[in-house]
Amino acid sequence: MPILTEKELQDIVNKETEAKSKLETKNQELLKLYKTEEHLKSQRKSFVASTVILGMLFLTLLFTVLFQPGLLGLNEGIKISDDEVVIKKSTLENYRDQGLDLEARASKYTNPLELNEFYAVQLGAFKKFNTKLSSDSYSVVDNANFKDFNLYTLGVFKTEEEAEKLRNVVKQLNFKDAFVGKYKDGERVESNY
């Protein structure tokens, strides 16, 4: 067997110590890499789990918005009271234009009751019957008084011929005594019995 000198033995021991030191360093590096890899795996798992959870929440929210908007109060809009109605601005403008048009037409219109002279069909003259048959502001049936009688006339016409047409219709309705009267300044001046 070969004999080793002290120096050779020391070299071998130094090499062994150096090898052990390198081996220990490599083991520590491997352990550190292993821990880093485990940490990255853990982070990856957390990321995947978070992504899956967020994806599920997003899909749930999307489903709710598309198919159940009432759960989130999305279809309620602005609350209005029962006596309010939502109207488009264009509809309001249309109503305003129609109102202006009616006002323009009304200013051209002459109320037949304001005529100095007109014809009307008198339906009858009664002593005991004194009931208003229309409002004071607009009247097709007019109440007038003549001596002790309450007179009821129907219609306001510019011509006697127009009034005669109505008298003929009224007579067919069993107002046998109906006749056309001419009125001037609100008073009867002529009559056609």
Image (cartoon, helix red, strand yellow):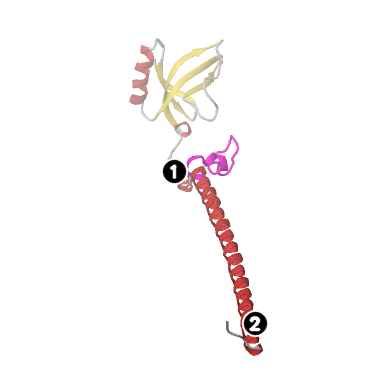
Give the secondary structure at mark 2: helix
Residue at figure coordinates x 49%, y 30% from the top left: 185
Q: Is 66 covered by the magenta stretch?
A: yes
Q: Which of 98 and 1 is in front in this view?
A: 1
In the figure, is residue 23 to the left or right of 163? right
Q: How crowded is mark 1: few (under 14 residues within 10 Å), some or many (20 or more)?
A: few
**In this picture, is 174 found above or below 70?**
above
Give the secondary structure at mark 1: helix
Q: Is 57 covered by the magenta stretch?
A: no
Q: Nearer the viewer, residue 136 or 2?
A: 2
The earlier-in-sequence mark between 1 and 2 is 2
Q: Nearer the viewer, residue 152 or 99?
A: 99
Residue at figure coordinates x 40%, y 9% from the top left: 174
Magenta stretch in the rendered image: 65-84
In the figure, is residue 164 to the left or right of 14? left
Task: Report x, y in % for residue 160.
Answer: 36, 25
Task: Report x, y in % for residue 32.
Answer: 61, 69
Residue at figure coordinates x 52%, y 48% from the top left: 56
Q: Which of 75 and 7 is in front in this view?
A: 7
Residues at marks 1 and 2, CA–CA distance in whole angstroms: 114 Å
Residue tagged by mark 1?
98
Query: What type is the residue that disc 1 sits on?
Result: Gln
Task: Report x, y in % for residue 147.
Answer: 55, 16
Q: Main secondary structure of the magenta part?
A: loop
Q: Residues within 10 Å of mark 2 (few under 14, many from 20)?
A: few
The numbered mark at residue 13 is 2
Query: What type is the residue that disc 2 sits on?
Result: Val
Of the 4 image quadrants, the one containing the N terminus is bottom right
Of the 4 image quadrants, the one containing the C terminus is top left
**In this picture, is 56 found above or below 160?**
below
